[in-house]
Image: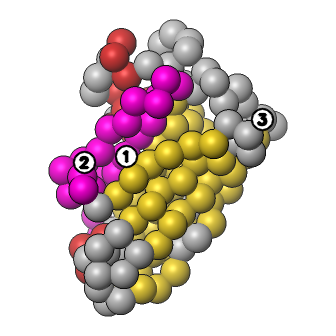
């Protein structure tokens, strides 16, 4: 049974920081790419960052230089460190596991796949981030 459980959301002032965590269980951590998505009220879900099995990372332009995605094999946890937060970062943040065409999952095989939400098979329930 695959589970992804997010934590770490909350309310923060503009310019503040938050660290989101995603605990992953029930799947091979060394086979799946992982990603963070977000969905603001009234908007479509968008990719924020992704990390593949080799540690390669991807970010949307709005997250570059402010957000850092990482993962820890020891406790099967993925994290998103968010600094210098802005009101436009307000959203529900979701972690997800991508089911790749081949394993292990590497972005080099398909550089655009990380941002396509329909490629992700497993999702957490989300955690709210509010910046004001």
Quadrant showing the N terminus: top right
Give the residue pinned by disc 2: 60
Residue linked to disc 1: 49
**How far apart are labels 2 and 3 at the CA level?**
28 Å
44 is within the stretch colored magenta: yes
Residue 3: give its label: none
> CB under 8 Å between callouts 2 and 1?
yes
Q: Spatial distance from mark 3 to mark 1, Cα to Cα?
A: 22 Å
Residue 116, image x, y percentages: 35, 35
Q: Which residue is mark 3?
A: 26
| Colouring | secondary structure
Magenta region: which residues?
41-65
Categorize mark 1 by other alpha carbons within 10 Å: few (<14), some (14-19), many (20+): many
Earlier residue among tags 3 and 1: 3
Residue 46 forms part of the magenta stretch: yes
Q: Residue at x 36, y 81 (%)?
A: 16
- Quadrant location of the C terminus in the rendered image: bottom left
The quadrant in which residue 17 appears is: bottom left
Badge 2 element: loop
Vertical placement of residue 105 versus 91, above or below: above
């Amino acid at each position: 049974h695959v589970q992804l459980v997010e934590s770490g959301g909350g309310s923060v002032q503009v310019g503040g920081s938050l660290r989101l965590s995603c605990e992953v269980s029930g799947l091979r951590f060394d086979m799946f790419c992982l990603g963070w998505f977000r969905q603001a009220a009234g908007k479509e879900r968008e990719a924020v960052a992704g990390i593949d099995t080799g540690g390669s990372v991807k970010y949307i332009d709005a997250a570059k230089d402010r957000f850092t995605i990482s993962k820890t094999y020891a406790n099967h946890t993925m994290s998103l460190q968010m600094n210098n937060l802005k009101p436009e970062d307000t959203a529900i943040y979701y972690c997800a596991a991508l089911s790749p065409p081949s394993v292990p999952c590497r972005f080099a095989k398909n550089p655009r796949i990380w941002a396509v939400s329909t490629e992700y098979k497993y999702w957490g329930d989300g955690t709210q981030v509010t910046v004001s």
